[in-house]
Image: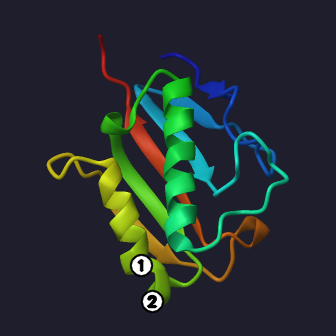
Amino acid sequence: MNDPLFLMVPGAPRPVAPYSHAVESAGFIFLTGQLPNDPEDDHRPFPQGIEAQTLRVMNNLRIVLYGVGSRLEDVVSIRVFLTHFDRDYAKMNEIYRTFFPPDRLPARTCIGVSGLARQGLVEIDAIARRLKD
């Protein structure tokens, strides 16, 4: 069995703590939760509102996936963390659903949390399956 690969992706948002952007093991790619960081300027404030933050987070996940040779279509599971669950759940879903075809929706868990790094409203992590060529 191969050792896990610990992957950092050029052009992805800088980590806010000590972690890899992704870890690949046994045909799966485990993506660290993404916040709505601007990948070009980590010091820029997060976008305002759950819709803009969800869009940024999903685009950040896409950057990491592409950077490790994968894509959103390969995602099999997602976890969503919301700081204002009741207020933001429906609006987050409106943006989230635009990233996946209706017949390829990953398994998902959505969790209300008391806080996220840098006062983000949403964080999303993912697991993708490495498809063999």
Q: Is residue 112 above or below residue 69?
A: below
Report the residue that reaches farthest toward the left. Answer: 103
Report the residue that reaches farthest toward the top. Answer: 133
In the picture, measured across the screen, residue 18 lies left or right of residue 54, that is right
Q: Position of residue 118 (x, y in %)?
A: 78, 67
Q: Image quadrant for the C terminus?
A: top left
Tell me the SS state at disc 1.
helix
Out of 22 and 65, give the one closest to the viewer.
65
Q: In this view, does 58 lie above or below 68?
A: below
Report the residue that reaches farthest toward the bottom. Answer: 86
The colouring scheme, among rainbow, by chain, secondary structure or one colour, is: rainbow
Tell me the SS state at disc 2.
helix
Q: Position of residue 87 (x, y in %)?
A: 48, 88
Label for residue 86? 2
Residue at which label 1 appears: 89
Neighbour tally class for label 2: few under 14, some 14-19, many 20 plus, Cα within 10 Å: few
Residue type at numbered disc 1: Tyr
Q: Where is residue 4 in the image (x, y as percent from the top left)?
A: 58, 25
Residue occupying the point 76% across, 45% down = 15
Give yes or no for contact between labels 1 and 2 (Cβ–Cβ under 8 Å). yes
Residue occupying the point 58% across, 74% down = 49
Neighbour tally class for label 1: few under 14, some 14-19, many 20 plus, Cα within 10 Å: some
Residue occupying the point 52% across, 16% down = 2
Residue occupying the point 79% across, 51% down = 16
Q: Position of residue 117 (x, y in %)?
A: 75, 66
Residue type at numbered disc 2: Asp
Out of 64 and 39, give the one closest to the viewer.
39
Mark-to-mark CA distance, 1 and 2: 6 Å
Report the residue that reaches farthest toward the right. Answer: 43
